[in-house]
Image: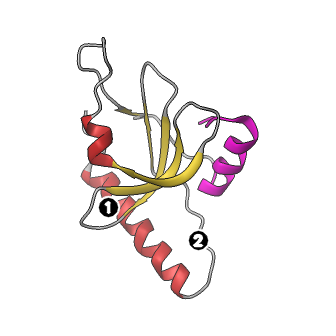
């Protein structure tokens, strides 16, 4: 499965450009996540809001299943290369049904309170 489709990439890149413009003008921009990636046999989850154009470096809420979700950057290339041992080359998946109900800061606040992403 392709983790980041062209349509998703366009939305992530648009959010990146909007974030840069918001920072330059000192205004707040708090987008909703565009895509949810997850480990189908584990507890790792990524809610991504933006990606720098021309790269595969994405920003979002990252939960490694250790009880400490945090906002940060992740390499899409590294996620795509991950293979889950013992599961016939199964890797990270994209939640094709995901629709963000909150902004990324709201997801982050909730995740900090509960210790995991509930999306």
Say if the magenta span includes residue 105: yes
Is 74 left or right of 110, judged from the image as shown?
Answer: left
* Secondary element at image label 2: loop
Q: Is residue 104 left or right of residue 77?
A: right
Distance from disc 2 to disc 1, alpha carbons, whole Å, reads 17 Å
Q: Residue at x 30, y 13 (%)?
A: 87
Image height of 6 relative to 116, above or below: below
Q: What predominant SS class does the magenta segment belong to?
A: helix
- How would you rate the neighbour count of disc 2 (Cα within 10 Å): few for under 14, some for 14-19, many for 20 or more? some
From the top left corner, tell me how far across and down residue 75 is, in percent.
34, 50
Residue drawn at point x = 24 percent, y = 13 percent: 88
Q: Quadrant of the C terminus?
A: top right
Q: Which residues are magenta?
A: 102-119
Residue matched to label 2: 29
Relative placement, left or right, of 68 versus 5 is right
Location of residue 19 in the rendering, given as x and y in whole percent from the top left corner:
49, 73
Residue found at x 65% / y 49%: 108
Q: How many marks?
A: 2
Q: Which residue is mark 1?
A: 10
């Amino acid at each position: 499965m392709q983790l980041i489709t062209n349509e998703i990439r366009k939305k992530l890149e648009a959010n990146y450009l909007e974030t840069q413009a918001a920072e330059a003008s000192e205004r707040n921009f708090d987008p909703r996540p565009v895509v949810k990636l997850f480990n189908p046999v584990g507890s790792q989850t990524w809610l991504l809001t933006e990606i720098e154009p021309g790269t595969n470096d994405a920003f979002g809420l990252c939960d490694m299943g250790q009880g400490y979700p945090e906002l940060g950057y992740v390499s899409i290339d590294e996620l795509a290369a991950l293979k889950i041992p013992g599961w016939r080359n199964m890797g990270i998946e994209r939640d094709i049904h995901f629709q963000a109900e909150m902004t990324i800061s709201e997801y982050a606040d909730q995740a900090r309170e509960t210790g995991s992403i509930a999306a």
